[in-house]
Image (tube, rainbow, N blue to C red):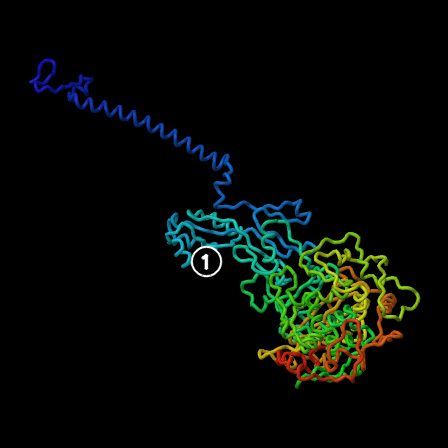
Amino acid sequence: MSDPQGRESNGRETVQAAPQGAAAAAFGTDVNVTGGELRQRARLERMHTRLLALSGGFCLIFGAVGVKLALATMLAPMAPAARQIAPQVPPIPKVEHGAALAGDIDIPTVHRATITDRNGQILAISLPLASVYANPQEMIDPAETVDRLASVLPKLNRAEMLARLQSKKQFVYLARGITPDQELRINDLGIPGIYFEPSEKRHYPLGRTATQVMGAVDIDDHGVAGVERAFDRRLTADRTPLRLSLDIRVQAVAREELQAALTNFKGIGACSIVMDVNTGEILAMVSLPDYDANEFGKADPNDRFNRCVTGMYEPGSTFKLQTAAMALQDNVVHVWDRFSSRPIHVGRFTISDMKTDHFAPWLSLPEVLAYSSNPASAHIALDVGAKRQREWLKMMGFLDRVPVELPEAGRPVVPGLSNWGQVAVMTIGFGHGVAESPLAIVRGTAATTNGGFLLKPTVLARPTPPDGLAPAAVQAVSDKIDDKAPDASVQPAIDDTASAAQTGNAGIGNPADAPGAERVISPQNAELLRRLLRLDVTKGTGKTSEVEGYLVGGKTGTAEKVGANGRYLKHLNIAAFTSVFPMNRPRYAVYVMIDSPVATKETHGWTTAAWVAAPVVRQIISRAAPMLGLFPKPPAEAAALDAALAIPLEPSIPSGTRSLGPGNDPGDPGEGASPKPGRARVADTAPRPHLDAKLRHEAAWIPGRTAADSSGAATR
C-alpha cells in the first residue's frame, strides 16, 4: 500500500515522474531510486572529479618532462660533464700547433715521449688509442653483446669473449689498442656495461731503420730493449722529445750498402757503424739481419741481435793498430825500427803470414801495418810485454763493456790474468785470442786519430759547437799547404797555434770537451798513427777503401771463425774494416763487418777484408759524406794534403840511433825478457823464430784457438 504522499509501507522512497506531454501520459512510467543508491552515485561523482584532476596533474607533469627532454636533447642540449663520460669516451687528443711548428709534439693523452734523430725526424711516437673493457654484472644479453662487438671487431675470439662476459667478475678486458674509429663505432652501439680506457700504442714510422738501437716496449708501454729500455724513465717522466745522435740519412745509406754486400757475399750477418771521432756521437748503427720495429714480438731472436754491441768477434788485424799505438806511446819502438816477419813456431803451430805474401825478412813499423804482418806484430807485442799490454787494453776499454747507453752492450772475451803469458801476448798482438764488440774497435780507432782522446760513445745528440771550429790537437796537417815540398821527416810536429779551418758541416767538436774524454795517446803519436792509417789505404791492404778527395785512412782485419769445438774454421772468416776520414782533419769513423762471406768471381776466391769489407766502406763514405757537409777535395788540393800526410814505407834511421832489427830484437821470444820501455837491448845471438818448451806449454791454454795455428789468411 501507498499513502497519499507516495511512501511505501516498507520504507522505500518512490519517485514518480510528472507527466510531460502526450508521451509521458502514454507511457506513465515511474522511476524508483533508493537512498543508498543516491549516496553511491554521489560518491562516484566525487571520485570521477578527483580522477580528472589527478589525470590533469599527471598530464602537466609529463608535459613538463617532455618539454625538458626536448630542450635537453634537441632544442638546447647541454655538454656533458667530463666526469660523466670519462669512463666511456676519453678526451680527444689535441696538438699544440705552435709547438709543432717548433719541432715539439704535444699530445695530451699520450704519456711516452717521442724519439727523434738528430735532425728531428721521428723514430718512435706513441699514438692515442683505447682499450675496451666490460662489467659482466651489467650485461643483459652476453651472446648478443658478443655478436654486436664482432661487427666492429671481427678478429675477436667469440668463444673467449662470451666466457669473459658470462663470468662473475666485475672487470674484464675485451680488446686493447683499438683505433679511434672503432672506439666511436662501439660507443654508438650503446651496449650497457661496456666502457673505454685511454691507452696508447708505440709506433715506429720508419720500420726497419735502426731497429736494434730503438728497441721496443711491452703491452704496458714499458721499455724492454734498446733506447726504449735505456731511457724508460726519461721517456715517461719528460714528454719533451728525446733527440738521438743518429742521422737517418746516414743510417739508410749504411744499411743499403751493407745489405747489398751481405746479399752479394751470402754472409750470415753484418754490421756497420758511423761515429763522430771528436764527440763520440753514433750517427749510424746497422746490424743485419734486422726486423720491422713494429713487429718486435714476432721477430726472430737472431734478427733482434745487435752485432754492433752484443756480438763479440776476434778483431783480427784491426787490432794491430792498438799494438802499434801501445808500443809508440810507451816509447818501446820507433817508426824506423825493424821487426822479423819470419814464421814463429809454437809447438806444432805456426804464426805466419799468408802463403801468397812474400815479405822481406824484416819490416819497418809502417810496413808491418801496411802489409799486415802477423809475426812482426807478435814481435812488437813481445817488446811491450804482457803486463803493459794488459794495462793498455784496460785503459782503452777493451777489457770491459763499451760505455754506451744501450743495455745490450756485452762484455768482451779475454784471457784471464793467469793465462796471459807470452803466447797470449803474441796472438793478441795481431787480434786473436780476444773477442771484442765492433763498437769497441771503432772507439779505439777514434782515439788514435782525434788527437789521442778516448771517448764514451753515445746514442744521444750532443750540443753542436756554434763556430764549427776544429780542435787544435788535430790541426797538425793544415788545409793550407805551403808551396814548398813537404818535409820528408816523419817526426810529428803539432802546431797548437794553427788556425782552425771551417768545414761545410755544423761544426767540429773538441774531443777534450766531450763528456768522459780521457787522453790516452800524445798528440805527436796520434798524428803519426793517422799517417800510418793513411798509408794502409794508399800503399797497403786497404786500397779498395779509397774515395777520391776524402783522404780515407783505415785498417783491414780478417779473423777465422771459431767452431763449436773451440778450433778455428778454415775458410770461414770475419771480414772487417775500420776507417776514419778525412785524415788531414779526422771527422768520422766508418766500420764494416761481414760474417762468413762466400767468395765470388769478382773477389777471385778471396774472402778477406780487403775484398769484402773495405769496398763497402768506400761506398758508404762516398754517399754519406756529402750529407754530412763534407765534399771531396779538388785533385790538386787533395794531392797536396796527401803529400803532407805521407810517410815512407821504410823511414830512414836517424844518425847516431841504433834501431831495433837484426841482431837487436828484444821482442824475439828466443832472446829472453824484453827490456824496459825506451831501451833497446843488443842481442847476444841471432834471432831464433821458435819458442822453447815453456812457451809451448803456455800455448795449451787455448787449444786450437790461438792464432798460432793460423795460416795467416785469418788476420789480413
Relative to 238, does residue 379 appear above or below in the rendering?
A: below
Q: Quadrant of residue 306?
A: bottom right
Q: From the viewer's perspective, tell me whether residue 204 is left or right of residue 689.
A: left
What residue is shown with label 1? 156
Point 89% across, 64% down: residue: 481
Percent across and percent down for residue 200 are 55, 52
Q: Is residue 248 visible?
A: no
Decide which of 233, 139 is in the foreground and name it: 233
Relative to 364, does residue 196 appear above or below in the rendering?
A: above
Image quarter of the N terminus: top left
Q: From the viewer's perspective, tell me whether residue 194 is left or right of residue 299.
A: left
Residue at the extreme right of the image, as rendered: 484
Q: Is residue 150 visible?
A: yes
Q: Quadrant of residue 370?
A: bottom right
Point 87% across, 67% down: residue: 640
Q: Quadrant of residue 428?
A: bottom right
Point 88% across, 75% down: residue: 656
Decide which of 505, 87 is in the foreground and name it: 505
**Total labels drawn:** 1
Q: From the viewer's perspective, tell me whether residue 212 is left or right of residue 73.
A: right
Mark 1 neighbour density, 10 Å: few (under 14) some (14–19) many (20 or more): some
Percent across and percent down for residue 441 are 69, 68
Decide which of 423, 680 is in the foreground and name it: 680
Amino acid under label 1? Answer: Leu
Residue at the extreme top of the image, as rendered: 4
Residue at the extreme bottom of the image, as rendered: 348
Point 64% across, 57% down: residue: 123
Percent across and percent down for residue 9 are 7, 18
Image quarter of the C terminus: bottom right
SS at circle 1: loop
Percent across and percent down for residue 658 are 85, 76
